[in-house]
Image (spheres, rainbow, N blue to C red):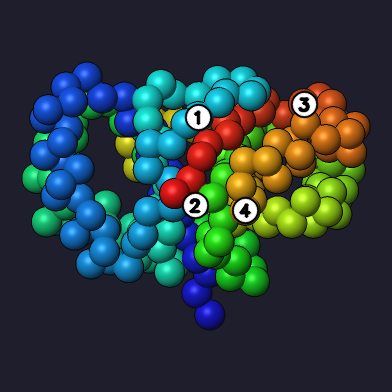
Amino acid sequence: YAMTAYLIATIDVHDTNGYETYKSLAPALIERHGGRYIVRGGERTLVEGSWPEGRIVVLEFPDFASANALVDDPAYGPVAAIRHANASSHIWIVEGPDGNATADGQHAFILGNIRMTDIDGYKPYSDRVPHILAAESGSFLARGGTARSVEGGMKLDRVVIVAFKNMDACRAFYDGEEYSDIKPTRIAASDSNIVIVDGL
């Protein structure tokens, strides 16, 4: 069966009027390919490393092929050109994990672009995370699945999306004692770039 996929975009708008045109045209194309917004310019907080400037948009698609079909759709080209004229963008697509989790009922997200520098050193962290996450009812929407850099030329290794019902639950996980205990393990074994963002 197909696994859910996500398109993550960070868009630094330099002409808001021109960008409004893009915002009015994009949703119909996104919908045509089975996509839906789960984050659309919500408040963002950089918590580790760096993240491109701008508003964050995250789209959920039924599968990796559908997300790719949107960005490769000839009809999307002229619409994307409007965005390019009014903003600079980083866009990438990542496949979700087995189990087909979706963002239903989830309204806060941790997004990570993680480059592992020590795979063996990273393992104790990745073994413990699911248990800590479950305690805050968080779920992985993406965890190192197949990823494609569409725009912006970012090098992707392990793209991670973690979903929570609200920002309180998200913060309880990220700032919590148990996670704070294993965070140094991940940091020592990787170059972690992590942002927390409010969903719809």
Where on the picture, by quarter, is residue 186?
top right
Residue drawn at x 19%, y 59% is 28
| Among the two numbered marks 4 and 1 on one chain, the one whose residue lies closer to the N terminus | 1
Label 3 near label 1: C-beta < 8 Å?
Answer: no
Instruction: State how many labels appear.
Output: 4
Q: From mark 2 to mark 3, how far is it between C-alphas?
A: 22 Å
Q: Amino acid at mark 2?
A: Val
On residue 165, the disc is: 4
For this view, does 103 lie left or right of residue 31?
right
Q: Amino acid at mark 4?
A: Lys
**Element assignment for label 1:** strand
Q: From mark 4 to mark 3, how far is it between C-alphas?
A: 26 Å
Q: Nearer the viewer, mark 2 or mark 1?
A: 1
Q: From mark 4 to mark 2, how far is it between C-alphas?
A: 21 Å
Q: Nearer the viewer, mark 4 or mark 3?
A: 4
| Among the two numbered marks 4 and 2 on one chain, the one whose residue lies closer to the N terminus | 2
Label 1 near label 4: C-beta < 8 Å?
Answer: no
Residue drawn at x 18%, y 25% is 16
On residue 94, the disc is: 2
Residue drawn at x 53%, y 69% is 3
**Element assignment for label 4:** loop
Give the residue at mark 3. 187
Is residue 144 in view from this perspective? no
Q: From mark 2 to mark 1, how far is it between C-alphas?
A: 20 Å
**Element assignment for label 3:** helix
For this view, does 4 lie left or right of residue 126?
left
| Among the two numbered marks 2 and 1 on one chain, the one whose residue lies closer to the N terminus | 1
